[in-house]
Amino acid sequence: MPHEVSSPPTPNHLETVVSKQRELSWGVAANLVSSFKYAWAGIIYAFTTQRNFRIHVGVCILALGLSIFLHLKAVEIAVIGVTSGLVLALELLNTAVESVVDLTVKQTFHELAKIAKDCAAGAVLISACVAMLVASVLIFPPLFTLICSAIKS
């Protein structure tokens, strides 16, 4: 049963996304500033190339914006921020796993590659569901109250 694997990004594409190709990518960053630059490059890469990462960023912004608008307690906003951040972090790890797997198996199908990619995607799905549950429990009651009071007015 053939399975189509997306092709990994080309070096030219990476240059335009990251803006500057990293020399000696196998090496350790020379200093803390370089480490932050590489981390930021990874976030920019994920945002520009991964649809799901952009969706998660949008939902995160919406959840935090609603939390602030509804005057939730600081601890509630923090919980929403932590769960949202976990989703984004796992989406970045998912992208990394997919890239390494694609690099390893090239354009071929391998059952273990499928398992690695599926498990990484499953981790993102579980974290996203938990984040939605947390946000729903914290945001919907005050939002419902606000909507009801606006209808009564």
Image: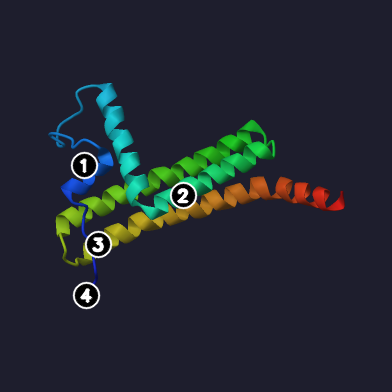
Mark 3 crowdedness (10 Å alpha carbons): few <14, some 14-19, many ≥20: few
Q: Is mark 1 in CB contact (under 8 Å) with mark 3?
A: no
> What is the three-letter code of the residue carrying label 1?
Glu
Q: Is mark 2 in CB contact (under 8 Å) with mark 4?
A: no
Q: Position of residue 70 (x, y in %)?
A: 69, 40
Q: Which residue is mark 1?
A: 15
**What mark, if any, has residue 6 been given in the picture?**
3
Mark 4 crowdedness (10 Å alpha carbons): few <14, some 14-19, many ≥20: few
The image shows residue 57, relative to residue 20, as above or below, that is: below
Q: Which mark is in front, 1 or 2?
A: 1
Q: How is the image coloured?
A: rainbow
Distance between mark 3 and mark 2 Cα atoms: 21 Å
**Relative side of 54 to 32, left or right:** right
**Relative side of 86 to 45, left or right:** right
Query: What residue do we see at 12% from left, 34% from top?
Result: 24
**What mark, if any, has residue 7 been given in the picture?**
none
Question: Residue 44 lies in what quarter of the image?
Answer: top left
> What is the three-letter code of the residue carrying label 2?
His
Q: Is mark 4 in CB contact (under 8 Å) with mark 1?
A: no
Distance between mark 1 and mark 2 Cα atoms: 24 Å
Q: Which residue is mark 4?
A: 2
Query: What residue do we see at 18% from left, 37% from top?
Result: 21
Mark 2 crowdedness (10 Å alpha carbons): few <14, some 14-19, many ≥20: some
Callout 3: helix, strand or loop? loop
Query: What residue do we see at 57% from left, 35% from top?
Result: 78
Distance between mark 4 and mark 1 Cα atoms: 32 Å
> What is the three-letter code of the residue carrying label 3?
Ser
